[in-house]
């Protein structure tokens, strides 16, 4: 039964001509699922509607070819095929009584238009010059003239009409994150001298016209929302109100049906938990409801229902927005409604989901391995098929992979035993959750152990070292090895591959740090793993008072964290701890007193004083037990063991998300006819539109004797 204090979260909210059934609002967010994956996208969004989210939105949906973000994944509403593609999602969401929203989008100078080859558009020709190579381009934007502005307003209206035809209930004007309408609002982007530049009143003119055009296009059938970033505007003093953010909201306060308020850049809007707490947006966006009477939605990686209620009661928000928490647990609202808050699969804020968009693939989640697999593999976060046999399963290893495997097998009804040689279950997270900023990552273990301890068909044994002989006599039909991986002391070669281990005194790995090794300073952390571990260990050692340097062959500290929005904060954290950062360098030798480095491009040498070296690079599977069992195949078959398998790092070292995925995959596929593959999705196209189109032979295009400078240049 629902706790009475949470009843306010389930009140309906009027949004213009439509009504949200509750206050749970899945805001637009990237999913890595484009119009090329319409069924995957529909299945992903439908799961949230089934789980109780009252509003479920798509991610960015381009209104014109001049807003082309490829190769990054984005949605489109350009033609009838796009209408049909998006209609799959709205139909799926409506099946569960939720509203469907669409974020119509023009990226302006922040899009590279690699596929369309059209010039990006900008209020004043100001380019976006990011540090992420995936966003870089040599094509600079075109200054928009009056016709371009008229075209943009027309494209928005056309997109709104298509969105209405696709069945969307809430249609957005997107004026945030440095995209085109937001560029008009920001004085550093907008240096125009016409009626669209100068004062706040003028700079807001385009956004007003976009909202008005959208409302005219959809009439009384759909709500019109504005999504706006307020971080930069909040920092600019206003001429008649506290800030320009206040003045922009005041200029538009009664025009949209809904305000969706957010920050300006991905690292601040979607801050990782390592650096950003729950509810971090409040200081910037809390003023909006003091100016407008229209409903306001905002985000803050909300996972606690108490925090959600506080946001509503204190007048910060009307609707609880979420992206990452809705991925980690699509059934979060329903669990609160049913009094099952302790079963919420809380987001850990690792931002693996955001990294998947940067990778250009469907979203993945550390906590929820079924995310993105709803249609592809027919996986469900709350329901699993019944057991396929009476096999008893032994899982050796109680880390993320082993616990997820046990939980999922237990949910299917199997009798499961988990044994771990350590005195506490948790695997790698026993150490990693204690690293600076990573405490919330412990939720991966806490959630699974909490559920497992309630299952009568699952037995947990910590402090239980099992040999191959012990397993052969254990009476199990299935054995799963989830014994993790080991960090090595291998170095980094000129071929950008791990090479021979370094054999010198006082060389350590993260495993040694976890075991409590007595490390002397000055210490150098040599990191070519490039994710969080190297910088976290460096920060930890600096906190302990050791003079610490961080060395990497990459151009940045923890270079891969640019994918997870953490890179700027990593550098800031190391700077606060006075950790020296040395990039583009590899270790040549170490004698216990001096560390020799070499530039990765020039080979130029450099020596630094060093008493201890921590190498954070290559991991290898800790799979000796697996191989011992496989070598005694006759023995395990005689013992009645049907199969011996590996999951997680014992199978292939990776991020925690990979470990959880492989543990879940094993459990889903045990005793089924699955070949381990997934269904392939296909774009929706109309034969009548494309007919029997074929690429003509070159002689048909140019003639049999065609020649000339163009052809010669191509040749």
Image (tube, rainbow, N blue to C red):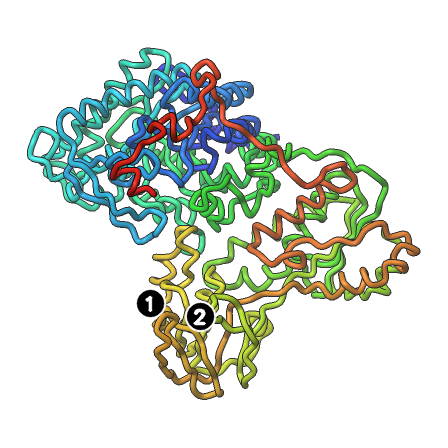
In this rendering, is residue 676 above or below 16? below
Residue, far right = 638
Marked residue nearer the N-terminal end (2 or 1)? 2
The quadrant in which the C terminus is found is top left
Mark 1 — residue?
575
Answer yes or no: is residue 691 visible: yes
Q: Position of residue 72 (x, y in %)?
A: 40, 40
Element under disc 1: helix
Element under disc 2: helix
User: Is 289 placed left or right of 165 in the picture?
Assistant: left
In percent of the image, x 34 and y 48: which residue is there?
A: 268
In this rendering, is residue 505 above or below 251? below
Q: Nearer the viewer, residue 150 or 426?
A: 150
Residue 245 numbered tag: none
User: Is 451 placed left or right of 73 in the picture?
Assistant: right
Q: Position of residue 260 (x, y in %)?
A: 34, 32
Mark 2 — residue?
538
State the CA–CA distance, disc 2 to disc 1.
11 Å
Asked whether the residues under the numbered discs 2 and 1 touch, taking CB atoms below 8 Å apart as contact, a structural biologist would say no
10 Å neighbourhood of mark 2: few (<14), some, or many (≥20)?
A: many
């Amino acid at each position: 039964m629902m706790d009475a204090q949470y009843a306010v979260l389930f009140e309906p909210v009027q949004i213009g001509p439509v009504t949200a059934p509750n206050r749970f609002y899945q805001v637009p967010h990237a999913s890595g699922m484009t119009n090329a994956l319409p069924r995957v996208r529909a299945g992903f969004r439908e799961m949230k509607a089934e789980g109780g989210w009252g509003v479920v939105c798509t991610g960015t949906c381009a209104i014109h070819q001049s807003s082309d973000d490829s190769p990054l994944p984005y949605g489109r509403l350009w033609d009838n095929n796009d209408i049909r593609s998006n209609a799959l999602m709205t139909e799926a969401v409506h099946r569960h009584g939720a509203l469907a929203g669409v974020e119509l989008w023009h990226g302006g100078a922040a899009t590279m238009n690699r596929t369309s080859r059209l010039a990006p558009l900008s209020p004043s020709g100001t380019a976006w010059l990011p540090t992420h190579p995936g966003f870089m381009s040599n094509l600079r934007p075109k200054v928009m003239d009056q016709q371009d502005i008229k075209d943009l307003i027309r494209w928005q209206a056309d997109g709104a009409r298509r969105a209405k035809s696709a069945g969307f209930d809430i249609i957005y004007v997107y004026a945030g994150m440095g995209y085109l309408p937001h560029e008009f609002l920001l004085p550093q982007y907008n240096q125009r001298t016409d009626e669209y530049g100068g004062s706040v009143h003028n700079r807001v003119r385009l956004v007003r016209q976009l909202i008005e055009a959208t409302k005219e296009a959809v009439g009384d059938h759909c709500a019109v929302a504005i999504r706006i970033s307020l971080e930069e505007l909040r920092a600019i003093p206003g001429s008649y109100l506290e800030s320009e953010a206040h003045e922009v909201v005041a200029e538009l306060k009664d025009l949209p049906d809904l305000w969706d308020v957010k920050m300006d850049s991905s690292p601040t809007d979607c801050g990782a938990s390592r650096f950003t707490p729950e509810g971090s947006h409040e200081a910037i966006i809390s003023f909006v409801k003091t100016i407008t009477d229209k409903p306001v939605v905002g985000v803050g990686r909300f996972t606690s229902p108490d925090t959600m209620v506080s946001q509503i009661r204190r007048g910060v928000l009307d609707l609880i927005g979420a992206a990452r928490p809705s991925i980690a647990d699509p059934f979060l609202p329903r669990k609160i409604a049913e009094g099952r808050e302790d079963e919420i699969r809380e987001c850990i804020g690792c931002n693996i989901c955001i990294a998947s968009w940067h990778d250009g693939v469907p979203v993945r989640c550390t906590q929820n391995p079924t995310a993105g697999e709803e249609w592809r593999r027919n996986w469900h976060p709350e329901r699993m098929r019944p057991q396929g046999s009476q096999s008893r399963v032994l899982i050796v290893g109680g880390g993320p992979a082993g616990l997820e495997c046990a939980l999922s097998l237990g949910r299917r009804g199997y009798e499961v035993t988990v044994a771990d040689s350590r005195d506490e279950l948790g695997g790698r997270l026993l150490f990693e959750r204690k690293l600076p900023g990573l405490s919330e990552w412990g939720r991966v273990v806490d959630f699974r152990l909490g559920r497992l301890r309630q299952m009568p068909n699952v037995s947990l044994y910590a402090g239980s070292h099992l040999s191959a002989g012990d397993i052969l006599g254990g009476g199990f039909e299935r054995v799963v090895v989830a014994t993790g991986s080991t960090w090595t002391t291998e170095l980094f070669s000129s071929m950008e591959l791990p090479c021979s281990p370094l054999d010198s005194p006082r060389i350590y790995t993260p495993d040694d740090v976890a075991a409590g090794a007595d490390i002397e300073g000055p210490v150098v952390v040599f990191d070519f793993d490039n994710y969080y571990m190297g910088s976290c260990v460096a920060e930890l050692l600096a906190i302990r008072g050791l003079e610490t340097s961080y060395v990497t062959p990459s151009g940045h500290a923890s270079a891969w964290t640019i994918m997870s929005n953490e890179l700027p904060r990593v550098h800031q954290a190391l700077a606060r701890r006075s950790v020296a950062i040395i990039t583009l360098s590899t270790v040549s030798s170490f004698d216990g007193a001096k560390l020799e480095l070499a530039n990765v491009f020039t080979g130029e040498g450099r020596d630094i004083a060093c008493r201890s070296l921590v190498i954070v690079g290559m991991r290898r599977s800790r799979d000796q037990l697996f191989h011992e069992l496989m070598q005694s195949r006759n023995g395990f078959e005689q013992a009645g063991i049907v199969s011996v398998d590996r999951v997680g790092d014992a199978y292939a070292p990776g991020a925690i998300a990979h470990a959880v995925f492989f543990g879940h995959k094993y459990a889903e596929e045990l005793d089924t006819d699955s070949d381990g593959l997934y269904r392939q999705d296909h774009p929706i196209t109309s034969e009548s539109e494309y007919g029997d189109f074929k690429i003509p032979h070159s002689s048909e295009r140019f003639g049999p004797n065609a020649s000339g400078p163009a052809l010669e240049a191509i040749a």
